[in-house]
Image (cartoon, grey):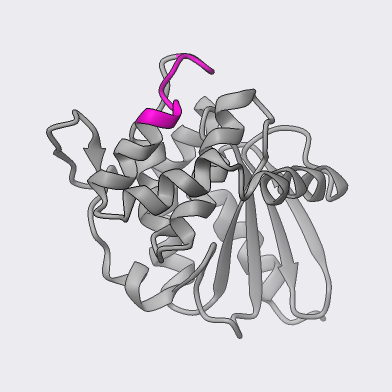
């Protein structure tokens, strides 16, 4: 399930380019706006379980549910959930969104995780190097990051997650068009998502 990888001179693992990122991306959302089900992931880039879900399940989840139009997938950070570098990575992600690179930057963060939290993997310098590796305007990106332009947004993500019952990461909030919600916590395999999507999209009897 792990995507093909290639190395860059900065020793960063770069994400594979998938056509659906161009076709279905809308900021931090991926998928058709009128999909009958929205799934919000609340996640922390420093969280090993989040890294596992990205590595083992996310691509299959997107290809099985998002690409066919069943699910609109929305990624939400958890601010400083696991410390200052979690917040730095979250702010950097939204700075990348300014340049239309939310999902490539989401992927490069997960492909280059820390050995342990707050150990320098998401320092300002390395976050800017990731932007450079993706071909972004690094001057604009660095200015955005260093001024903390998206600090409030990242912390609001965390507050929203807690309001919805999130206590650990990753957590997935399913929302149907008629307002039903369902919380799935943990790095579940694809089978758990199949079951949840099937139950939420099946006609009520």
Q: Is residue 122 left or right of residue 18?
A: right
Q: Is residue 36 above or below residue 18?
A: below
Q: Is residue 35 left or right of residue 80?
A: left
Q: Position of residue 181 (x, y in %)?
A: 80, 62
Which residue does the image show at 70% across and 61% down from the upper left?
174
Q: Residue furthest bottom?
A: 34
Which residue does the image show at 40% across and 63% down from the upper left?
99
Q: Is residue 86 above or below residue 38?
A: above
For the C terminus, the quadrant is bottom right
Is residue 189 visible from the viewing direction of this image? no
Q: Is residue 120 magenta?
A: yes
Q: Position of residue 105 (x, y in %)?
A: 39, 49
Which residue does the image show at 82% across and 42% down from the upper left?
162
Q: Which residues lie in the magenta part?
A: 116-125
Q: Main secondary structure of the magenta part?
A: loop
Tag count: 0
- Please tell me which residue lies in front, 138 or 60: 138
Q: Is residue 190 magenta?
A: no
Q: Quadrant of residue 102?
A: bottom left
Which residue does the image show at 65% across and 35% down from the upper left?
169
Is residue 111 visible from the viewing direction of this image? yes
- Please tell me which residue lies in front, 134 or 138: 138
For the N terminus, the quadrant is top left
Q: Position of residue 119 (x, y in %)?
A: 47, 14
Q: Is residue 166 above or below residue 23?
A: above
Q: Position of residue 136 (x, y in %)?
A: 30, 55
- Please tell me which residue lies in front, 1 or 203: 1
């Amino acid at each position: 399930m792990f995507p093909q990888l290639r190395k860059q001179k900065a020793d960063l693992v770069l994400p594979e380019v998938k056509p659906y990122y161009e076709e279905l991306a809308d900021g931090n959302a991926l998928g058709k706006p009128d999909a009958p089900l929205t799934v919000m992931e609340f996640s922390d880039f420093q969280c090993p379980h989040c890294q596992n879900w990205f590595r083992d399940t996310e691509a299959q989840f997107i290809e099985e549910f998002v690409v066919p139009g069943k699910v609109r997938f929305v990624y939400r950070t958890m601010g400083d959930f696991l410390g200052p570098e979690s917040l730095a990575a979250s702010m950097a992600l939204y700075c990348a969104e300014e340049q239309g690179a939310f999902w490539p930057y989401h992927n490069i963060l997960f492909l280059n995780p820390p050995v342990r939290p707050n150990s320098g993997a998401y320092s300002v310098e390395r976050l800017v190097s990731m932007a450079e590796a993706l071909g972004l305007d690094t001057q604009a990106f660095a200015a955005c990051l260093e001024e903390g332009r998206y600090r409030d947004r990242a912390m609001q993500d965390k507050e929203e997650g807690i309001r919805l019952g999130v206590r650990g990461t990753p957590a997935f909030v399913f929302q149907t068009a008629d307002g039903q919600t369902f919380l799935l916590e943990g790095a579940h395999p694809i089978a758990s998502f199949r079951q949840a999507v099937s139950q939420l999209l099946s006609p009520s009897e």
